Amino acid sequence: MGQIIEIKGKVKFKITLDPGVWIFDDRRIDLDTYFAGKTINESDIPYEEKLSHYWDREIREGSVSPPTLKTEKKYEKEKLLTGTFGIIFEPFLNNAEPLPEATKLVIETKNNKVTIPLNEAKDLIFKFSENGSPLKANGPVHILFKDGSNLDNPITDVLALIIE
């Protein structure tokens, strides 16, 4: 049970998180590019710009044939096997539905407890993979701040997330 993290406390729904399955989650973010400032959220790109990009590619390369798609799939698979990934905590926090009187998130680790205001907790990033491997030594997740200020010293050895 060392790989499962529970969200509990002043929440409407207790939730268990399994970081081992997040590699298949479309919400994962590539941390190699995220903190370098090169991240582009697909949903932030307007529809017209996506369509324009598609037509520009059609003009330059002609229609996309299956071998190109196979190469792109191979690249994505290789990226999953070698990349460093994380996931933003906000959707999980929203699903737990903190009660109105809840004001803080307590991150319980093996060594201590870290308290974060609940309104800032939604921006936490849970790093679950490094260089294609799950975090086992100090895992199952390393908690990072959105601004990357604790990138060199993340919150590790997480046991539970308690909403108070």
Image (cartoon, rainbow, N blue to C red):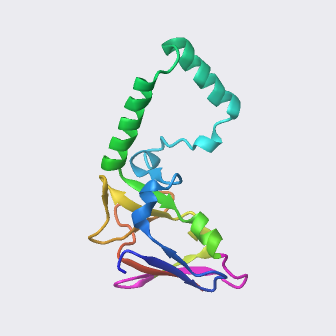
- Can residue 148 be seen here? The reply is no
Relative height, residue 102 to residue 88 (above, below): below
Q: Nearer the viewer, residue 6 or 66?
A: 66
Residue 72 located within the stretch drawn in magenta: no
Where residue 30 sits: x, y (%)? 43, 49
Residue at horizontal 30%, vertical 48%? 82
Looking at the image, the residue that sits furthest to the left is 137
Where residue 142 sits: x, y (%)? 39, 67
Residue at horizontal 48%, vertical 14%? 61
Relative height, residue 154 to residue 37 (above, below): below
Where residue 140 sits: x, y (%)? 36, 70
In which quadrant is the N terminus drawn? bottom left
Horizontal side, residue 132 vs residue 102: left or right: left
Horizontal side, residue 37 vs residue 48: left or right: left
Relative height, residue 71 to residue 44 (above, below): above
Tell me which segment is drawn in magenta.
97-113
Horizontal side, residue 17 vs residue 152: left or right: right
- Can residue 49 be seen here? The reply is yes
Residue at horizontal 66%, vertical 79%? 98
Q: How many marks?
A: 0
In which quadrant is the C terminus drawn? bottom right
Where residue 49 sits: x, y (%)? 65, 28
Residue at horizontal 34%, vertical 61%? 152
